[in-house]
Image: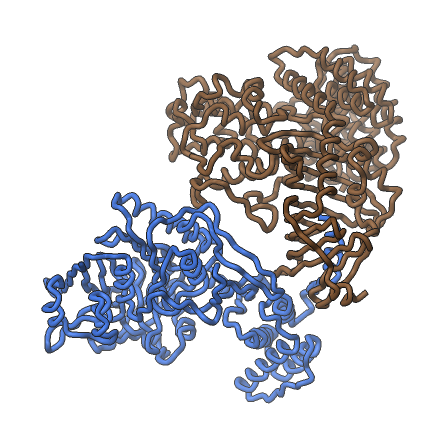
Chain colours: A blue, B brown
Amino acid sequence: MKRLSQWALAVLLLTTVIPAHAAERPYMETEEVFYHVMESHLSKPEVKQLVKGALQSISEHANEKQQLKLPVSAEDDTLGEMEQRMAEWQAKGKWDSTTINTWAIDGMLSTLNDPHSVFFTSDELRLFQSDVENQFVGFGFRMRMQNNELILREIVPGSPAAASKVLKRGDQVKKVGNISLVGKSFEEAYAYLKGEAGTEAVLTIYRASEDREFQVKLQRASLSLPEAEGQLFTKGGIGYISLETFGSDGAIQMRDKLAEFARSGQPMKGLVLDLRDNGGGYLSTARDIASLFMEEGLLMYTTNRNGVEVETWVRNGRDIGIPVRILVNGGTASASELLSGALRDHGIAKLVGTKTYGKGSAQQVIPLSEGDALKLTLNEYFTPEHTVVNHVGLEPDMLVEDYGAQVVEALHSLNVTNWELSDENGDTIVNGVPFPTVDPLFKQASDGLQIKAAVLSHLLGDKSIGEKDYVSLAPYLKSHPSLQLQSQNGVHTLRYQTN
Amino acid sequence: MQKFIRTLSCVLLAATLLTPGFASAAGGFMPYGDISNHWAKTSIIRGVQAGLFAAGSSAPLFYPNRDMTRAEFVALIDRLYNGGQYQLYPLTFLSEHAEWNRGEGFEEPYLPYKDVDRLTWMYTPTLRVSYILDRLYGPHAIAQVFPGEQMKPNQAITHEEAAKLMQMFTMTGDNQRAWEEVKSWGWLEGESTDLLKRGEAAAAADRLMTYLLQDTILPLLDYDGSKFPMVPEIQELFPLFVTYTDSKTSDEKMYVNAVEAIRNHEDTDNTYLDLEKLASNSFSNQIGVHFYLSWNPSTPLTDNLEEAFRSIDAYFQDKIILPDTLRLLSANVYDIALQMGANDSAEYEKVLKRLAAYEPKLKQDTEEWESLAIYLGALEIKAGLTDKALVRYETFASRHAEALLNSAYYLVQEGRIQEAESLLAKQKPKPSDERMTQLVKLLGQELASLKQQPSIATDLTYTLNHLDRVSSYQVKGEAFLSGFSFKYTQDVDATRNSSHTQGFYQSPQQLVSDKLETYTDGQKKIQYSYDTKKQGWVQHPTDKLDFVHEWVGTQSIQDRMNNLHARYYKQSFGRYDIITEWIPGAALTEKAKSLSFSRGKIKNVSLYMNKYYIDRESDELVKHVWRYEEIYENREYVAYSGTDQYNLSSNVKVSIPDEVRKEVTP
C-alpha cells in the first residue's frame, strides 16, 4: 500500500514508552501497572480515577492496620503526585515498598469495575496457570458454593482425599485447622485451603445426610487431571463429554474422546457436552474445540478500547453431524460461553441448564518486573450473532435448575426413549453415566421411596410435579406402566420407556 | 570484536550459506526391520538421518513397497523444504524464522479442503506446504496439485502429483511441464500415472537432497549483492596443517593449544604471544603459525595481512603440493583484503599484486594453480579488472564450478549473454560429475530466462498499466513496517483521483490495536489520516518522498531494468503468471544517493524485491508481495514488507467528506 509510511511516522510519535530505569524506583511496579492499565484496559480509564483508587486503597489499609488517618486529597490527580503522596505516606506508615505497591495496585484495579483484571505475584501466577491446565496442589477434591455452604463437588481419584476413604460428595467443609470457613466466600475459603505440596491440615467436615460432624487429616499433593472426560450413555447412541477447562490439551483430549465414540461402532445420535462449572481457559483451545464441531464458521467478534473489531474464524474443522446439547450453569464462563454461544448461533448446539456467568471479556497476562504479572482485560467478545455476553450471560434454550434434571432434559431433547436412573455413592447415574449430584436421587420416607421432583418431572415431561424437593414415587409407578423400580441391596434403579 | 567480524565476513559467510540444513550420514545404522534387502535402502537410511522419516520403537518398519499417500508425501516435501528453505528464499521472501504456519500477520492461512482437519498429524505440514505454494504461485496453488474440495490425503499419490510438488525446486516455468522436468532431473522414473512407492519416494527425496546441497535454481541471481564473485566453500576452517601424534614436544603442544583456543573462540593475548614465540624459533609448522597469527584481533589488518602472506611464503618453502592448503591460505588473504577494501578499494589492487606474485611458482591448469587463481580472479573483479578476471576464469571454467559461475555471471553483467551461452555450450561435464552436470543445466535454464527479460518487463508493464486504466478497484492487504503491523482495505477511485483506506494497526509498544483510516486526494497530493489520540484528522503532503522504495515506485519497469539492473523472472502455475522482481542493492543505492528523502540520505539498500501474481486470462494483477530493507545515513533501518490482494472488478466510489477536510488540524 502506498503512503502507509506517513501513518507509521505519525503513530511512532504518539507512542508512550515506559521508562526503564528500574532499580532506583520504589514504585516501579505501581507505575508499570498504571501504564498498562492506561494504555490497554478495555474501559479507557482516566488518570485521575487510577490515582484516586490507589491512594484511597492505601488510606483504607493504613486506617485498618494502624488506625493511621491519611486523607486522600482531591488535588492529587497525576502519577507524579500519586508517587509523591505514596512516598510521604510510606514514611509515616513505615511499610516496605512491596506492601504499599500492592495496596496501590489493588486500588487502581478496583476502580475498573472488572473482577478479571488481577495482579498476580509470581506464586499466584503459577497457580493460575496450573488451574487453566487442570493441575493443582491440594487435597484432591473440588468444591461448589451452594446455599452459602462449601460443598464437595467431586473427589479426584487417586488423590489424598480419595485415599482417606472418609470423604463423600456432598460433604460440607466447615473448618480447616482452627479456621472456620462458614460464611466465607469461595475465594477466601480457597485461600485458607491452599498450601504447598506435602503439607498437612485437619479438616472439619459435616455430612448432612447423616447429620454428623467429623475430622479428617489430609496431606496436600500435586495433581494433574484430564481436561476432557466422558463415555457413551448406555442407551441411544449418545456420547457424553465433560470438559473441565480449556487448557492446552483440552482439544486433543476431546478429539480423542470423539474418536473413541466413533470406534464403538454404534451409530451416534447425539452428544452432550458438559460445560457446567467450566471457567474457561485459552481462546486457541476453544477455537480448536469448535473445529471439532464445524467445518468453517465465525467463532466470535472481539473489540478493544479503540473500537477495532476483529473476527475470529474456525477453519478446516469438521461438521459433527449430530445434534449437540451443551449443559451450562452459572459457573460456565469465558471460553465456555464463547464456545456455547458460537455453537448455538451456528445451529449446532442447544444450551440446557441455567444462565451462564457472563464473562464476555478476554485477558492477557502481562509479565511485570520481579516475576509478578498483571492479568488485564483487553477485549470484549461477542458471539457470531453479535450477542453480548459480558455482564449478561447466555440464557439457555432449555431452562432447567436441577443438576441431574439438566442431563435428563438434554437427553430428552435428543429423543432418548429408554431410561435407567439410579443412585450410587452420592452420584446420580443416568443411562450409565455418573453425575456428581449434591443430593441423592432417592430418599426413603415414611410413605415409601421418594425421588427428586425435578428429575422425575423432566423424565416424565410432567410439569405438575414441580422442581422442588422430593416426591413420592409410588403414584407415578401406578400411573406410568413403563416406569419401573427395581431395588436390590439398597440400590434403587428406575427404568422408563417413552413412546 | 574483529574476530567476530571476520567470522562473518565474506569467505566464511559463503561457507555457512552452503552448509546444508540436512544432517550428514553415518555408517552401520539400520533404522527399520524391513529395508535391509531393499534397493532404496541407502536412500531410506539417509532420509532418516536427515530427519525426513521418523524411526524408532514407534515406527519399526518402513514398508518400502507400499504406496505412499498424498499426506505422507506432502509431509516429506515439508521436511525437504525445511532443510533447504534458504534455496528458495529469493522466490518466497519468507524469512527462516517466520512462523509461517500461522501466517506473517493477522490473517491465518488455511487449507482449501474439507477433509484435512486442524487436529490431525497431517494438518501442520500440509498447511505449511500450501502456504509455501501460495507464496510461490498464487492463491490456492495446492489445488493445482490436488484439485477439488477434498484432498483425499490417504489416497496413494501418483508420480505426476509428486512431481508437481517437487517442481518448486526447479526452474520450469510452467506446471504443465512438471513431470517432464522432474523426470529430466532423474528424481522420479516410470510413468506419470504410476503410484509412488514409499521406497521410490525415499530415493526421490535422496536425489532432491543432493541437488539442494549443490547449486540451486537461479544460480546467477545475486539479489543482495553478496554472492559474487563466488569463491569455493571451505570445509575445514581451523586445520592444524600437520598431523600430530599423542607424544608432542612442548612447542607442538603450545601450537595445538593455540589452535584449539582460536577454534573455540577462547583465544587471548597469550595465545598470540605463544604463536609469536613459535614463529621466531625453529618450529617446523610455520604455515600454521603464521596463518593463526593472521587471526590476531588486536593487531591492525595490515599486520594480519602480512602474517597471511607469510603463511603462503612458508607453504612454498615446504615445496609440498597441497591444493586444499593453498586454497585456505588464499581465502585468508582474500578475506582480509575484503575487510581492508571495504574502507579503501585501492587496497584490492595492492593485495592482488602481492598475491599474483606467487602465480609464476605454480604450474598453470593444475589444481594447485586453480586454488590460487580463483582468488586472483575475485581480487581482479574487486579491483575493477573484470575483463582480466573473465579471461582467467574461462581457462578453467569447465573444471571448476565457481570459475564457471563467475564467468557466466560477469559476462551477463557486461551484457555479453551470447558469449556466456557459447561458453556454456562448450561445457560437456561427465555424468559422474554431479555438481557440474547440475550447474550446467541450471545455468542453461537461467540464461534462457535472462533472454526473456525484455518480454517479461513488457508483460509486467502491461499488467501494471491495467491498474491505471480501471476506474476503480479495491485492495485488501497486510503490511509490516518497522515493527508495526497493518491490516487494511483500500478503495481506489481513479475517476475522482482519490482513495480511502480503513483498517487497523498494531504497534510493537502496544498491547491493543488501533484504528486506521485515511483519505488521499491525488489531485491536491494530500493525505488525511484520522488520529485516534487527538480524535481528529491530520494531513500530510504526498508529493515528497520518504523512502527509496517510494522512489522506485515512480520508475517505470523499463527504467528499472535499464537503469537499476532490475532482474525479472516469470513462472506459470495454474491460472496465474508469477513475476518476481529483484533490484540489487548496490545499483539502487548508487542511483538513490543523489536523491533526498525525508528520512535523509540513503546509506544502503539491502533488499528490494517484489512478487506480482497475474491472472493470465484477464492480465489483471491479483496479488502483490513485497519486501524492502533500507538503511539511512542517520542509521535508521527500515524494513517494509507486505501482501496486497487486488479486486479490479470491485466498483467503489470515494469522495472525501467535507468534515475530513474541514476538521484538519495542521
Q: Quadrant of residue B176?
A: top right
Residue B249: give x, y in percent of width and height.
67, 26
- Res. A286 in view: yes
Residue A255 image point, x, y percent: 38, 48
Task: Report whether residue A102 is seen.
Answer: no
Q: Residue at x 64, y 16 (%)?
A: B437
Does B545 appear above or below B331? below
Residue located 45% across and 64% down the image:
A334
Q: Nearer the viewer, residue A96 or B86?
A: B86
Residue B605 location (% of width, % of height):
78, 41
Taking depth in this image into account, of B659 and A132 the one nearest to the observer is B659
Q: Is residue A440 left or right of residue B268?
A: left
Residue A310 position, x and y percent, is 56, 57
Q: Horizontally, is A433 left or right of B534 in the view?
A: left
Q: Is residue B523 left or right of residue A245?
A: right
Q: Quadrant of residue A17?
A: bottom right
Position of the C terminus of chain A, as image quadrant, is bottom left
Decide: is B444 above or below A407.
above
The residue shown at (17%, 74%) is: A471
| Left or right of A374, for residue B412 | right
Is residue B262 placed above or below B284 in the rendered structure? below
Query: Residue at (78%, 50%) from the top-left corner?
Result: B636
The number of callouts visible is 0
